[in-house]
Amino acid sequence: MRLLHLYVSPEHTYFGHHGLPPGKAPMLEVDQVECVAGKGLVGDRFFDYKEDYKGQVTFFEHEVYERLCEQFGITGVPPSVFRRNLITTDTDLNALIGREFEVQGVRFFGTQESAPCYWMNQAFAAGAEEAMKGHGGLRARILSDGILRRG
C-alpha cells in the first residue's frame, strides 16, 4: 500500500452537524503524521475521541476517487473532500475489514467500511453517496505507535 496523501483536521465539518450547515474546518495535508496506538492521529479531530473507537484513522482508495471524478465529470477537487485521513493506492481496502495489517511499520486493524453519508452529495456531487456505497473507505484502529509518511 502506498500513501499518496495524508490529511488531518482539527475540527469536525459534518460529524455532529446533522440538520445544520456543515462546518468550515479544512483538511490539512501533511507530509507525515504521528499514529498513537488506541488514540488516533495526532492533530486530528478524532484523536482520543473515545476508548476503542473504530475510526481512529480512515483510509480511502485513490482509484475510487478517480472513478468518482470521471463518473461525475469533476475536475480540480482534491481527494480531501471525502474527509478521510489516508489516501492509498494499490490496495483493496475492503479486503482489510476484520484483519490486522501494517503500513510503514505501523500496525492497524480494519474495523469496517467508512460508509458514505448524505453530506457527500453536497461536498462532491449529487449522487455521490449512492455511488460510494461499498467503496467509502476503511475505518481502522491503530495498534502500534509510529510515523506515516507520504509517498
Image: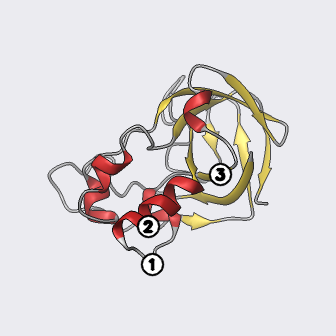
Q: Which residue is mark 2?
A: 69
Q: Quadrant of residue 41?
A: top right
| Circles 1 and 2: CB atoms closer than 8 Å | yes
Q: Quadrant of the C terminus?
A: bottom right
Rendered residue at 51%/53% (across/down): 64
Q: Position of residue 136 (x, y in %)?
A: 44, 44
| Image position of 60 (left or right of 21) | right
Q: Is residue 102 above or below residue 13?
A: above
> Mark 3 to mark 2: distance in Å?
16 Å
Q: Is residue 83 left or right of residue 91?
A: left
Q: Amino acid at mark 3?
A: Thr
- Identify the disc placed on residue 88: 3
Q: Is residue 54 left or right of residue 119?
A: right
Q: Secondary structure at mark 1?
A: loop
- What kind of residue is marked 2? Cys
Q: Which residue is the site of mark 1?
A: 75
